Image (spheres, helix red, strand yellow):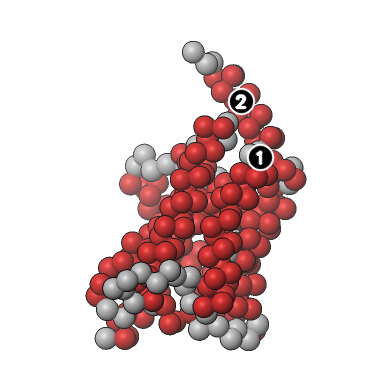
Amino acid sequence: METASTLITNAVHRERRGAPWWYTVLILLPLAMGSAVSAYQHTLEHVNIPGLNPRLSGYLTVLVEEWLAVFLVALQSRRGGPSIRELVSGGWPKATAFLRDAGLAIGFLVVGVPLLALIGRLLGDSGDPVNFLPRTRTEAAVWVLLAATAGFAEELIFRGFLRWQFKAWTNSTALAIVIQGVLFGLAHGYYSRAMIAIAIYGCLLGLLAWWRKSLRPGMLAHAVQDEVFGLLAFAVAK
């Protein structure tokens, strides 16, 4: 049976070592390929699924990509890396703990969303992300699942695994936050030049995760933002 000191020693060793470089590439590969395709298609990347329109095809394609990356992040814990629970960290033992993180998430959105929009406007964004937002009830229902997945999966991958990985490689928290933010921006190819704004937003989410020592507030903020963005578009489309 491992003692507390042994567990701490193992955790420190994991933090310093990181995962193999090729495993990081393996986790990023489906996201990178999806981003490149989305930049080419000027919408969410999608395989044309028979019987489904491009929007629903895109939702399902992204769901598969992100859960595949989550699976690979979970799998690396068997190779000595941190578990999903360790990466997420924090906890909600009482309702007040959840309300605190929810309040932080809302506060983050109040500041972050207008900033994101302002940066995108200053960059002269030429992309048209609105074309993949839901227009039917079926699309809206799948969008809810997609937004919840993005909130969990993208925060786990970028602010969790990649921030841990680059901290181990560079021995710098600041560099780790910046690098994962840049990769987060690059993973959103359909935003064109506004990927720079997404990268900055990813860095802000990285700072939130570092400050709170938990991914939970960022996961809530990310999921709520995507949910509201899509469902408002659906309501307007009706």
The kind of residue tagged 1 is Pro
Image: 194 above or below 70:
below
The kind of residue tagged 2 is Asn
Helix, strand or loop at disc 1?
A: loop
Looking at this view, is 204 or 179 the one in front? 179
* Position of residue 194 in the picture relative to residue 137 (left or right): right
* Residue at screen point 44% across, 82% down: 130
- Residue 143, image x and y in percent? 34, 68
- At label 1, counting other C-alpha atoms closer than 10 Å, the crowd grade (few under 14, some 14-19, many 20 or more) is few
* Residue at screen point 57% across, 75% down: 39
Looking at this view, is 220 or 167 the one in front? 167
* Residue at screen point 59% across, 19% down: 5
- Mark with earlier residue (1, 2): 2
* Position of residue 213 in the picture relative to residue 138 (left or right): right
Q: Nearer the viewer, mark 1 or mark 2?
A: 1
Residue hosting label 2: 10
Quadrant placement of the C terminus: bottom left
Residue hosting label 1: 20
* Residue at screen point 32% across, 71% down: 50
Can residue 195 be seen here?
Answer: yes
- Residue 29, image x and y in percent? 58, 56
Helix, strand or loop at disc 2?
A: helix
- At label 2, counting other C-alpha atoms closer than 10 Å, the crowd grade (few under 14, some 14-19, many 20 or more) is some
In three-dimensional space, the C-alpha distance between marks 1 and 2, rounded to whole angstroms, equals: 17 Å
- Residue 12, image x and y in percent? 65, 30
Image: 164 above or below 13:
below
